Image (cartoon, rainbow, N blue to C red):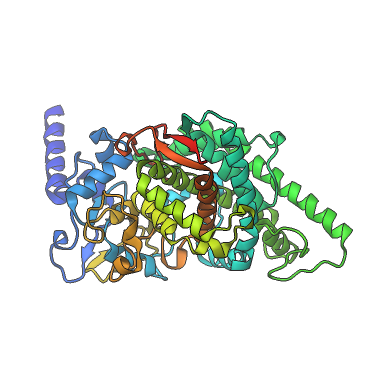
Amino acid sequence: MLFWALVIGAIIVAWLYRLNKDYVVLACFTKRVRTVDGTPLENSVALPKARTIFGNAFDLAVSGDNIFTFSRKLAATMKRSYLQYGFFMPFYNIITADEAEIVMSDQKNLITKGLVYNFMVPFLNRGLLTSSGKRWHARRKMLTPTFHFNILGQFEEIFKEESKKFVENLEASDLNSITLNEIIPRFTLNTVCETALGVKLDKQMNADQYRASFRMIEEVFVTRIGNPFYLIDLVYNIFLAPKIEKHISIVHRFSSDIIDKRRQLLAAEIEREPGVKDDENEDFSSKKRYAMLDTLLRAERDGLIDHAGICEEVDTFMFEGFDTTSMALLFSFMNFSLYPEMQERCYQEILEYVDDDISKLDVNQLAKLKYMEYFIKETLRLYPSVPVITRETTSETILPNNLILPERTQVIIHIIDIHHNPKYFENPNTFDPERFTPERSAGRHPFAFVPFSAGQRNCIGQKFAILEMKTFFVYILKKFRVLPLMDAKDVTLAAGMVIKTPSAVKVKLVKRV
């Protein structure tokens, strides 16, 4: 009996293997990607060979690489967009601008965020980043006025104050060795709290605990996306979720306390000035600083959002404005140390266009710093804060590139691989800010450089981020020369909710005379 059971089992395995070729057993339950004209799939998309009989589900685990390195190696090997079959769904990986444009421009079947964004829901709930459909449209419409040019001008005053404070703290420290990973997150968290939420951080708010809890949440997120078993909610809830329950509570309590503090400030102001203005550009009082949170509090008063919705958007903006900008500032700071001639060019540009009295710095002066903008863009090309974004098909979707994607296909746009594609950027690993001059940008594919995504779901705060970064570096470069203490090749990259480096990024600062 045992003999015949083994024979039958072997026949079944052989049949499954033959049926599925490189995608066996597990993948036989996955709906397949097809071609419109019926030609072989490999004519339209690369098909990496599976490393186990379970499709591509365990390729990462077998490779021994972290998820960031694994994805970069795969893109370099395939040299074109590629298709994987995992647990019950296909994964369409895009590394070309043409295909990225198809996805980012689709306003029907490819506007829903992908599966990995669901993993952020315990942390961010259903805010602007993770929501879809009518909810997303309503929230986007509600928040867009927050980033009007006039309001960005008000934010500039906060950028200046926080940059000045940052420089003063640097002057009081050992300038011979500055570890950027430690100090930049404090700056960005302080800045986002005051601009977005209208509240200055104090010691009682325990910002260090917030940052530590944020890191723990991120570690669990990376663990989940790297293990196919954790894609299953039941498995995740049993083995991983308990590890971060406390940290999620800390993060949510931090933002909730800020909301309560802002409510009190606004209530006190309204009581002092009962005849305050209230329209789209002046929130409660023209005499006070505007904050993104004010828009949400007004919407709550008008019945357009509830307290839970406000918490969702506050947590979302804290995440997007804190961590993404931190990494962009860190890598830009590092690049200033590595490329002294380019640093000097930015400094000379500052001398030419920025008032000697730096307190008079404004958005018009910053707009003239074109080379600095090229420098920041080149940093974002090499080190995009969000190296990967995902979408999910909501129904069977026919693409112009001959592919038919079944419902629930995960479409993964590898922004970092598009940015390093020699088709769009010659010598892509070379740091060259002048790639972004009008002359050299002419004719480049419009979706070849998308550090803030593109299309309808692009980053709502991209102008905010560039303005913050320019202001920060005006203050830094007017006060210091930035010298290297390491080489770019010493920096390793890793995946997280945003791009990460486990390396300590250090620079030396010398005061200008």
Picture coordinates of residue 380, whole percent (x, y): 39, 52
Picture coordinates of residue 3, whole percent (x, y): 11, 29
Q: Residue at x 58, y 41 (%)?
A: 167
Picture coordinates of residue 356, whole percent (x, y): 58, 54
Q: Quadrant of residue 397?
A: bottom left
Q: Residue at x 66, y 50 (%)?
A: 194
Q: Is residue 253 visible?
A: yes
| Quadrant of the rendering where the N terminus is positioned | top left
**Above or below for 475 versus 506:** below
Q: Nearer the viewer, residue 475 or 211?
A: 475
Picture coordinates of residue 376, whole percent (x, y): 42, 53
**Above or below for 81 versus 239:** below
Q: Nearer the viewer, residue 466 or 10?
A: 466
Q: Is residue 460 visible?
A: no
- Tell which residue pokes out farthest to the front in this image: 513
Residue 360 placement, left or right of 440: right
**Above or below for 366 versus 22:** below
Residue 97 placement, left or right of 161: left
Residue 226 placement, left or right of 203: left
Q: Residue at x 35, y 41 (%)?
A: 338
Total labels: the figure holds 0
